[in-house]
Structures are given as structure tokens and as C-alpha cells.
Amino acid sequence: MIVGKAPSKVMFDASEVFKDLGLTDYKILWDFNGDGQADKQDVVSTTFVYNEAKLYNVYVRFPNLNNYIYTFPIRVEQSDVPVCEIVVTKGEGKNYTVVTNFFDKTVNITNYQFDVLDRNNKDTVIDTIKNNNGMFSYQFQGA
């Protein structure tokens, strides 16, 4: 199953499985990325965000039914533009550290521009930071 381009937010709903199998106790283990660790349990309907473009195996187990592990593949396609996460870590006072992490490790970005926007007026740029490594520290002037 192809779910879209990275990042993809996928909704999983096993309510019909419980209904079809006549299971009244909602015991379920979800492993959305195939790493062997349960990402969610005892939640019939939930979402998961896939950030990286690749093939994932989703594993589902119903402990009260049997010891079988049910699996199905999900493919997340490469985005047209590089996909990253921006991690903002609070320091002391109004100081923050910003780090950019690309999910596709082959991306080679050499110029970054970060615009700090006014919280009350999203069209107002308070500051612009340009650099070549995607990391910087910033001290906000206001609250």
C-alpha cells in the first residue's frame, strides 16, 4: 500500500476487525515501523507519522485472539523537496537552540535561511538568520 510522500500521516483503524472477529476486549499491539517495539497498545484507532521515504512493515497482534503477528507493507514515497524536522531546544531564559535534521541522509543543503515571525502577526518578520549548517542559537527579545 502506498500512503503518499514523506512525511505522511496515516490513520489506522482496527474497529471492524474487532467487530468481525467478535472480540469484546480491545487488546491490540501496533508496531508501525517494523522495529519490533510496540508503538501503541490497546488503541483501536490511531495515527502515525512516517517521516522517512521507504518501505515499512506494520505488525499487528491481538493478544486475546492468538499469538499470531499480522503484517502488511506500507510504502512512503520520496518527497519532491527534502523533508526535515526542526528541533528547537529551550536554554536559559529566552535562549533557544535550533537544529535542522534531514530524514534523507543524501541531502546536501549548503544555504539555510530561518525567518523568526511575530507570534501575533505572522506576516511580520522579526529576524532572519542565514547560515550554511542549519543550526543556530537565538535569544528572543520579548515573551
Image (spheres, rainbow, N blue to C red):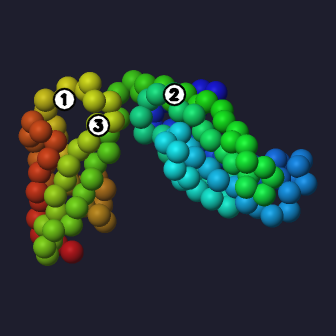
* Mark 3 lies on residue: 102
Measured as percent of width and height from the top left, residue 122 is found at 31, 56
User: Quick one: SS at disc 2?
Assistant: strand
* Mark 1 lies on residue: 109
- Whether residue 44 is visible, yes or no, is no
Q: Are marks 3 and 1 in contact (CB under 8 Å)?
A: yes
Q: Quadrant of the C terminus?
A: bottom left
For label 3, the crowd category at 10 Å Cα-Cα, with few meaning under 14, some 14 to 19 and many 20 or more, is some
Work out whether residue 29 or residue 52 is closer to the camera in this orientation and state it: 29
Name which residue lies at 27% across and 53% down: 87
Q: CA distance from mark 2 to mark 1?
A: 25 Å
Q: Amino acid at mark 3?
A: Phe
Work out whether residue 127 or residue 49 is closer to the camera in this orientation and state it: 49
* Mark 2 lies on residue: 55
Measured as percent of width and height from the top left, residue 58 is found at 60, 39
Between circles 2 and 1, the one closer to the viewer is 2
Name which residue lies at 53% across and 33% down: 56
Measured as percent of width and height from the top left, residue 133 is found at 12, 39
If you read the primary sequence from the N terminus, does the residue marked by circle 3 or circle 2 appear first?
2
Q: CA distance from mark 3 to mark 1?
A: 9 Å
